[in-house]
Amino acid sequence: MKLLRVGTAGQERPALLDDEGTLRDLSGLVADVDGALLADEAALGRIRAAADSGELPALDGTGLRIGPPVARIGKIVCIGLNYHDHARETGAEPPAEPVIFFKAADTVVGPDDTVLVPRGSVKTDWEVELAVVIGRTARYLESAEEGLAHVAGYAVAHDVSEREFQIERGGTWDKGKNCETFNPLGPWLVTADEVGDPQDLSLRLWVNGELKQDGTTAEQIFPVGEVVRYVSHFMTLYPGDVINTGTPAGVAMGRPEPKPYLRAGDVVELEIAGLGRQRQEFQQA
């Protein structure tokens, strides 16, 4: 299933995109798309049955904003340097264990919402990423297979980053990762059964129409199941939590000088095969 949330910011309602591309209203069936829903197999079963029967009312998507596909996200765990080609382009050694940092849940915006270049920023960068959405409480998992079994679904994430704040201003990476609007998410949460193998997905990103990133999750150093297993040994993952699993090669930081960092007026588009497409216009904060 492709689950999503539509409407003005803070007033989104749950919806489903059916196999024919018709937007269907779920608000008469469930309150929202959140951790509580993703952990409730019976409720998900009712959605599937209603979708199969054709009883869900259609929505007119004309002019309708698409919001983040998951409400009330508890935490966003991010994995750094998780692609072999990205590590090579930045001159970094592939990590022996996953690099973990966090993004605050309030960085999440809709897939086509405006993204703000922070005041004083000179190194705002792009990163297309596969986002993993947790569906079952995960703690001390023993195998990558168990990790995959705890995944509710997947989405497109844009891990926008300010490299000067992240690397040159001291302390942790978090200063360059948590500026407002720095995590567009969506358009859909695609359930794990529909995605299949998460290590066989193509990721692409364009800036002002020019292809910048063209990668595949097969390049991940630590695959999805292992990432979920590993993280579960350091913190409990709850339904509705999100893991951003890293970006492939092609970011501005990895390019020759002068590096083409983002400025107000730039347009970024990104997609992951089967998970949908985003488009953001960048403006000054």
Image (spheres, rainbow, N blue to C red):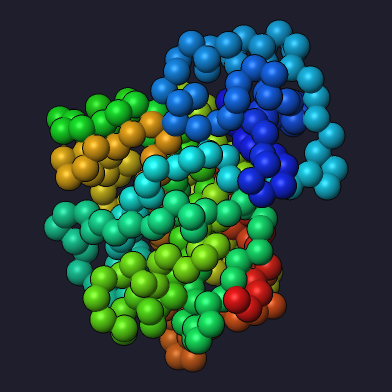
Q: Is residue 186 above or below residue 37?
A: below
Please name whichever residue, 156 or 135, is drawn nearer the observer in this view of the structure: 135
Question: Which residue is pictured at 60% across the width and 66% down the height?
Answer: 115
Measuring from the top left, give residue 85's x and y in whole percent.
35, 64
Looking at the image, residue 128 sits to the left or right of residue 165; the answer is right
Residue 79 in percent (x, y) is at 31, 55
x 53%, y 77%: residue: 118
Residue 22 location, quadrant: top right
Q: Position of residue 1 (x, y in %)?
A: 58, 25
Quarter of the figure with residue 24 = top right
Would residue 37 be visible to someone looking at this image?
Answer: yes
Above or below residue 114? Residue 137 is: above
Decide which of 117, 163 is in the foreground and name it. 117
- Work out which quarter of the rendered image holds the C terminus and state it: bottom right
The answer to whether residue 10 is above or below residue 269 is: above
Quadrant in which residue 237 is drawn: top left
Residue 230 visible in the displayed image: no
Q: Residue at x 60, y 21 (%)?
A: 30
Query: With respect to residue 112, does 146 lie above or below?
Result: above
Is 204 left, or right, of 169 in this rendering?
right
